[in-house]
Amino acid sequence: MTTTNDKNIATVLHLSTLTQYIIPFGNYIFPIVIWSSKKGESEFIDYNGKQVLNFQLSIFIYSVVLCLIAIPIFIYTIFQNVPFDACFDDHNFVINNLKTGHLTGAVIIAIAAVLLFIFIKVAEFVLIIHAAVKASNGEEYKYPLSIPFFK
């Protein structure tokens, strides 16, 4: 039987990941602190803590992979298409020298990676709120596309 206190702690556990928008790495620090201090008291809190950390680590890995795809392609494209003999007095030299005709398949992949990154971050926010509501109702919730690091 899940108590009201367990439901509240599990809800705060999920919502504590939103501190990433205020404090760097808050989405790891606060859930780890809450989960490690309360996991022995309830199986419900232990389950939710594992789900939160698995999801946050999965999102981190997905984000790193997408950045490793997009950033080098954009840097290469800028250095390839911007001539170094261009006059740097013109504040719009990058805009003048980057034309849509220079878009290659690699740039389109990089743009797709950036769009996918934005989609993942929006989905992360929505899923965190959804998981917090499920936890407040006493239901166990498993995040989609979450890699099970903690079992």
Image (tube, helix red, strand yellow):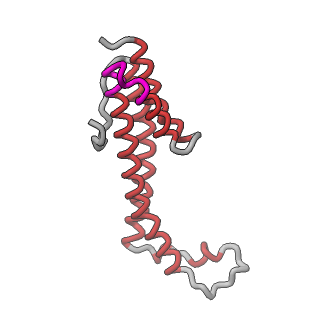
**Residue 4 image point, x, y percent:** 41, 12
Q: In which quarter of the image is the N terminus?
A: top left
Residue drawn 45% across and 42% down?
122
Please, is residue 85 above or below residue 95 in the view?
below
Question: From the viewer's perspective, is 140 left or right of 87?
Answer: left
| Observer-nearest of 144 and 36 | 36
Residue drawn 33% across and 14% down?
2
Question: From the viewer's perspective, is 38 left or right of 96?
Answer: left
Please, is residue 151 above or below residue 103 in the view?
above
Q: What stretch is highlighted in magenta?
A: 36-47
**Residue 91 image point, x, y percent:** 70, 73
The verdict on residue 21 being magenta is no
**Residue 65 image point, x, y percent:** 38, 58
Q: In which quarter of the image is the C terminus?
A: top left
The verdict on residue 44 being magenta is yes
Question: From the viewer's perspective, is 108 left or right of 150?
Answer: right
Residue drawn 37% across and 30% down?
49
